[in-house]
Image (cartoon, rainbow, N blue to C red):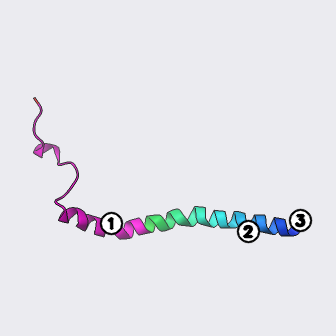
Amino acid sequence: MRLGRRIYDNLRKAMAFIFAVHVPIAGLALLETCKPLVRKAIARSGGGGIPPAEYSPSIP
């Protein structure tokens, strides 16, 4: 019984480690993959975001 509990605990810790390490890496990879799609969407919508300072109205 004790051995089974130890094996289960070790498996649980190993799975937690695998998720903790690999999920952020996969997320960054997906983010890099989706960057061109996001840029296209922003370009189609008219640019979005805050315009550069030279195009902003001056404040007295």
**Marks 3/2: CA distance?**
14 Å
Q: Which residues are magenta?
A: 30-59
Seen at 80% across and 69% down, the residue is 7
- In the picture, measured across the screen, residue 27 lies left or right of residue 32, that is right
Q: Which residue is mark 3?
A: 2
- In the picture, measured across the screen, residue 28 lies left or right of residue 56, that is right
Q: Which residue is mark 1?
A: 35
Seen at 66% across and 67% down, the residue is 15
Seen at 42% across and 69% down, the residue is 30
Q: Against 52, is 42 above or below?
A: below
Identify the mark nearer the N-term, 3 or 2: 3
Task: Please give the count of numbered marks on the rendered protein.
Answer: 3
Q: Are marks 3 and 1 in contact (CB under 8 Å)?
A: no
Q: Quadrant of residue 11?
A: bottom right
Please rate how many residues cluster around mark 3, counting C-alpha atoms within 10 Å: few if below 14, some from 14 to 19, many from 20.
few
Badge 3 element: helix
Q: Magenta segment: does it hold 49?
A: yes
- In the picture, measured across the screen, residue 39 lies left or right of residue 53, that is right
Badge 1 element: helix
**Marks 3/1: CA distance?**
50 Å
Seen at 33% across and 66% down, the residue is 35
Question: What amino acid does circle 3 point to?
Answer: Arg
